[in-house]
Amino acid sequence: MGWFWADSNVSIVNARGAAPPMPKDGNLSPPPGCPMHQSTLAVAKPPTPPAESACPYTPVDLSKDSSSTPPKYSKYNPLNYMFSDLSQDRAENQTVALPTEREPSTIPKGNGEGNWEYPSPQQMYNALLRKGYTDTDATAVESMVSVHNFLNEGAWAEIVEWERRFGQGLKKGWEMCKRGEEGALADTWMREQEVPQPKLLRFMGRPKEMTPKAAMIQVMGWIYPSAFGTEPPFDRHDWFVQRDYNGQKKEIRYVIDYYSGDPEPTGEPVFYLDVRPAVTPTTAVERMMRWGGDVWYRASGAKLRENETDQGRVN
């Protein structure tokens, strides 16, 4: 579902913003497996591209042999592994006019040149056709774009929350986490300006590669279906985020699993995002701090003691 573009000239203030409202159309739902990423590219192991280049990836030795056939990755933008030359022109035999306006996101680019932009409905439709989805209903594309943008804004909001807690090191992160999720959110609101704004360097969709956590949940659902039974995620992304800490820039990889939930009684679709940093020695500690801090805060009765203290102050 994460389809941004790197070749944009739009410059937007890198302000933290809320996700746009969820579309009210009860028929909205992302295509199974997120077709924006259901290509052989998602299965293959693509080479690691330069982080800030906006040109399609080209192997180093390609220029040495002009007669050689360019690899399939050469047509993709290395920052998002999507076509870098999609047209806004109306497709052949297209019977419905689609908007060509592109909505800006609240997600800053890693190169500092404004924010990422979402594709227009016309660009998304052209991409689907180019990937072989010739039976795509053009009348549903605008709804697909709305869901796509909504989910990505929600994913970024979760990443920003992680960075606000741990962007200044583990010590300050624990000071927030030990007060549980509720207390940490209050601290975050007060200290959000102290942490440099994270930036999205690049990302890729990997819908056919289930994360270890998602696989474990599926096993637990098989053993204890009443407690853990759930459908597997319909998409998976890896987002590479720039963290500024003590004047140094560090790249953090975040893993996002996208789940569909039961629709609301009104028919509106429900989605769940499991956003967390990929496991490294440092991020493993971050994840244990966040989970363990909330469990300890609630199990130890700290919240009850804080409420009693607050009542004593009022009296």
Image: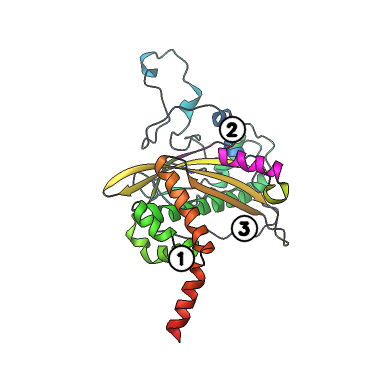
Residue sitting at x 62%, y 58%: 23
In contact (CB < 8 Å): disc 3 and disc 2: no
What residue is disc 1 on?
183
* Residue 242 visible: yes
Confirm whether the magenta stretch covers residue 314.
no
Which quarter shows the C terminus?
A: bottom left
Amino acid type, residue under disc 3 in the picture: Pro
Residue sitting at x 53%, y 41%: 237
Closer to the camera: disc 3 or disc 1?
1
**Quick one: SS at disc 3?**
loop
Amino acid type, residue under disc 1 in the picture: Gly
What residue is disc 2 on?
130
Query: Which numbered disc flags the more N-terminal residue, 2 or 1?
Result: 2
**Quick one: SS at disc 2?**
helix
Real-space Cα separation, disc 3 to disc 2, in angstroms: 27 Å
- Report the span colored magenta: 203-224
Closer to the camera: disc 2 or disc 1?
1
Residue 19 image offset from top left, x and y in percent: 51, 58
Amino acid type, residue under disc 2 in the picture: Arg
Q: How many marks?
A: 3
Front in this rendered view, residue 175 or 128:
175
Residue 111 image offset from top left, x and y in percent: 34, 44
Is 216 displayed left or right of 252 in the figure?
A: right
Front in this rendered view, residue 221 or 122:
221
Quarter where residue 6 is shown = top left
Which quarter shows the N terminus?
A: top right
- The circle drawn on residue 23 is 3
Is 142 displayed left or right of 84 in the figure?
A: right
Residue sitting at x 57%, y 50%: 273
Real-space Cα separation, disc 2 to disc 1, in angstroms: 48 Å
Query: Which numbered disc flags the more N-terminal residue, 3 or 1?
Result: 3
